[in-house]
Every structure is written in C-alpha cells, then in structure tokens.
Image (cartoon, rainbow, N blue to C red):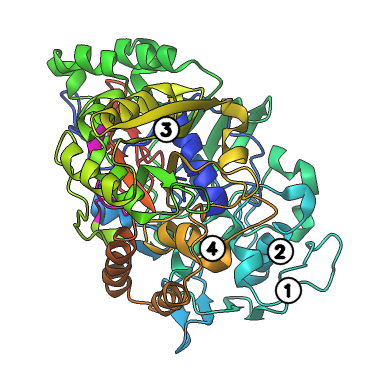
Amino acid sequence: MSRTPRISRRAAAAAVTVALAGGAAACGPTSGDAGADATPHKGGTLTVLNQAPQDNFDPARQYTTGGGDIPGLVFRTLTTRERANGAEGTKVVPDLATDTGEPSKNATVWTYHLKSGLKFQDGTAITSADIKYGIERSFAPELSGGPPYFRDWLVGAENYQGPYKDKHGLDSIETPNASTIVFHLTKPEGDFPYLATMTQFSPVPKAKDTGATYYLHPVSSGPYEVTENQNNGTHLVFKRNPYWSAATDSQRKAYPDTIDVQAGLDPAVINQRLETSSGTDADAVTTDTNLGPAELAKINGDKELKSRVGTGHFGETYYLAFNPKVKPFDDIKVREAISYAVNRTSVVNAAGGSSLAEPATTFLPDQATFGYTPYDWFPAGATGNPAKAKELLKEAGYPHGLTITLASSTSDASYQGPAIATAVQDGLKAAGITVRINQIQDDSYSSTVDSVKTEPGVFLGSWGADWPSGGPFLAPIFDGRQIVTDGSNFNNAQLNDAQVNATIDKINAVTDHAEAAKEWGALDKQLGQRALTVPLFHPVYERLYGKNIRNVVISDWDGRVDVADVAVK
C-alpha cells in the first residue's frame, strides 16, 4: 500500500496497484451490522466482486501480508494480523505458530514453534519442514512474484535458486524437529514477525508440489480449499476444508460455506451491483474497488446505502519527489520554496475532495503504528504561502521566479496524473514558479521515474507499506544502501547519509514495535527538514458492501474488507 505494497520495492508496486484499482479502506466501517438481523451466522455463499483476477494462486507467487485478503482463506502462515477494526488490526498475532516469534538478543535469529493439531486439507499433519519447503520454493525463478525480503534477509539466500535446482536447501532455515523452525538473518530485523505473515510462510507438502502448475490445485492449510479456478483466478470457488479446526485458528471466523470470487469486472459495474444488492449481490463484498466522488454524493443522501459503507485509511502517502542531482533542485532553498508554495486544498480537491484525501505534511501516514509524529517544517497553510516561497526563491538567485518541469503519468486513476499535476501547477504559479507538465505514458511511468538514468528533477510519487511499520516505509526511500543504479530505485533523492543509514539499522534491531514506532517517527521528522519530498495527501478509502453482509472488519493493516470474517444473512 506501495510505488507503492503494499509497501518495499515490490510492495510499493503492489500498493499502488491497489490504489489504482480503487484504493483500500482501512478504519472501521460506518456500520458493520447492516439490516434487521445483525447476528453473523454460519452458512451461505459469500460473493466477492473484484476488478483484478487472483492470478497465480500459489503462496510462493502472492504478494500479500497479514492474511486478511483472499489468499488468507486458503494459506495460513506463521503469524497473521489481529482481526479487528482500525488500529487494533495492525497488531501481529500467532497463526500456525504458538507466538509471534522468539528473537535472539540482537534479533538476527528468530525461533517459532507450531501449534499441535495442524492439518492440511487431506488430513496429513503440517510440519516445520513443510513451512521451510514453502519458503524455499518461493526462490524458484518460475515461481517469481513474491517479496524480495527473503533474498536480502536470510543468510546464504542471495544466489539461491529454489529446491528444484538446489536439493540441499537453505541452511539458514533450520527444522530441529517437526514443530520447530529457526531463521538465521543477515542483520537484525525487529519486524520479522510482520514478514512471517506473508504467504511464502504458508506450508507446502513437497509430495504434492507440482511446480509452476501448483496454483491450480494448492493444498489448503486454512478454512477453505480451492474447488474451481477458471482463467487463472478470474473465477475462484472456495469450499470448506474439513480438516481445518477453529481450535487452532482464533482469527478466521469462516462463516460462509462457500466463497465465490468473480473478477475482471468494471469498477462502476461492481459498485452498481453492490448498491442494487439484488439476488446473490446482496451477499457480496469487494476487496479492491473504491467509491468515487459522484457515487459518494449519491450514497451520502441515502441513509440505507450510507450504512453499508466502510471508511478508513491504508498507510500510503502521495508526494512530490525531488532528484537533487538535477538543477535547480540541488538547492535546498528551491525545494523549500516549492514546499511553501503548494496549495494542498487544490490537490485534495483534484484527488476527489476531503472524503477521499487528507492533506499531508509528514511522509509517514497519520497512524500510530507507523510512528506518526506531527511536523510541518514548511507551513503552507491550506492554500500555500507564496510570499515565503518568493522570499526563498530570491535567496536562491531567482528574484523573478523560475520555470520547472513536473513529470506525471498520463492516467488520473493513479493519483499521479494530469489532475494532481495541474493542481500543483496552479498552486506554484502564485509563487512565481511556472510549471511545465511532462506527461509520461502510464505503462512506462514507474520504470522512468524509478531509474537513476532517467529520473526527472521532480515528479509525482507515492509509497505504501508492505506492513504497518515505519521500516518498510522509510528505508526504501531514504536508506542509501538501497540505491539501485541498474534497476528500480525508490531512493529518488539518492540520499546516502551514513548517520541516517546507521539510525535505520539501530531501529531495525528493536523488537518492541511501539518503541520502534517512536524512533521511526523521530527519523521521519528529521528527514522532513531536508525537503527531499513534499507530502501532498494521504488517501481515504470508501467501500460499499451488500445489504445482507454481516460482521464487516476493516483494519488499518491493508484496508480491505476481511473476507475471512464476513458473514452473510
């Protein structure tokens, strides 16, 4: 959630994908108990109406964390998230494991013990060897698509090619017995329990592994098993796994008997079907489609429809990104002037209004789990401070203003397109800054702005976190050791400050999330003073659901309706 997963390099990309698909909702819904009979019951069929197909439905190839999305119905992991609304849902809790992990003193070794009574859909016991194998197969080139952390974090994993080519496996993952698994890391990582929520930590029985075709018939460790998979995830049908036991899984309620996932749908069609709620659509939700301004205006005038909207925030920030290697952005006074000149009211309106966007002055999202610490080094007010901007430009040697080129996407669907660019342009004009907009084709926008070779001087950027912590939010953007000169580079300022790098290492070693959050917030405040970005807004997400839906849980983890907890009337 991001350029942007949901956030990290790939997460960044994933989170932006979520935003493009309509964003994510993340606090509690306005009403989780629609209708006269508010009690959730077991039984029935839940329908999921989505834009994006659930393609390559293999735990090695998925890029999801927390277990609250569709893969979490089938794939259990060592840890998961607390199934609760809002901030409470950002907590890590045990899933297959008995706890969230036992770290060594320096957080370079993490040990997990499995619960007793865990079984696959065929009744065979789940062992630590199955989890080790599940992780190792995610390194196979033919099963690419997952996160990059394993190769970076696990000792000896840098050149590992998976169990199909290397039968020996990874020595950094030990299984001393059937219920214990130990991970040896290259560096301290206090966030390892968050990583352990990713689907790559799902067990895979080696005897049932069919390699690149495993996605057609994956073996379930969760409450549901796959009975149909048409057109590579365009239509999925899940039915109960008879060997799943609620006694070992306190987080998934698994109310419906069947879950029918229909994808490849137009967003307007999805929202229209949910609004009308006729037939099976009354028992439907969406996990990837937001309401737009016009739809919200209609819904806000209808009490019944308004009661079926979930509202919240996914941890994501949209901002202006500077490349200080390009003049005049090498001068901090120019960057500060632009920071003062931005009219955030115009930008928010361009993003759909205050119902869909909140003005931002911090890089970290406005959520405690990230370490949010309020600051505003360049107070522009609601509509900009052109007088202060002009003063700084004069000091920088531009008494008569200057002209800059702002790169944006051709697509407004990404919040990085013409509408936002024009709003920025209009705001800076009052300060004597002429903005020329360079529109880059949407399908090549990320590859252009995230390449050291082609990165423009200033462009519209965004970032979302792979999990709700300051680490995957700040490190990819500001850690100098993550600068990539021959691939996708997200440290767009190309900042390589030894003190900042050391601070990141220090915080990564902290295993107390609340304490780490405070330190991430302090680092964000420190970095903000350098004017390397201009935070513009944090998105707000609104989701509609069918009239028979009960027990809606929308957390701040990823902002999606938690399909593992939903019930139908």
For the point 63% across and 58% down, the residue is: 484
**Mark 4 or mark 1: which comes first in sequence?**
4
Sequence-wise, the earlier of marks 1 and 2 is: 2
- Lower position in the chain sequence, tag 2 or tag 4: 4
Q: Where does the image place residue 199, in percent across and percent down from the top left?
A: 56, 53
CB under 8 Å between discs 1 and 2: yes
- Disc sitting over residue 170 in the figure: 1
Q: Nearer the viewer, residue 147 or 34?
A: 147
Q: Earlier in the sequence, mark 3 or mark 4?
A: 4
Q: Amino acid at mark 4?
A: Leu
**Is disc 2 in contact with disc 4, using a CB cutoff of under 8 Å?**
no
Which of the numbered marks, if any, corresponds to residue 118? 4
Residues packed near mark 1 inside 10 Å, few (<14), some (14 to 19) or many (20 plus): many
The C terminus, quarter of image: top left
Label 2: which residue? 136
Residue at numbered disc 3: 287
Instruction: Identify which amino acid the numbered label 3 is placed on.
Output: Thr
Quadrant in which residue 473 is drawn: bottom left
- As measured in the structure, the alpha-carbon distance from the residue carrying label 4 to the one carrying label 1 is 24 Å
Q: Nearer the viewer, mark 3 or mark 4?
A: 3
- At horizontal 47% and vertical 57% (from top left) the residue drawn is 477
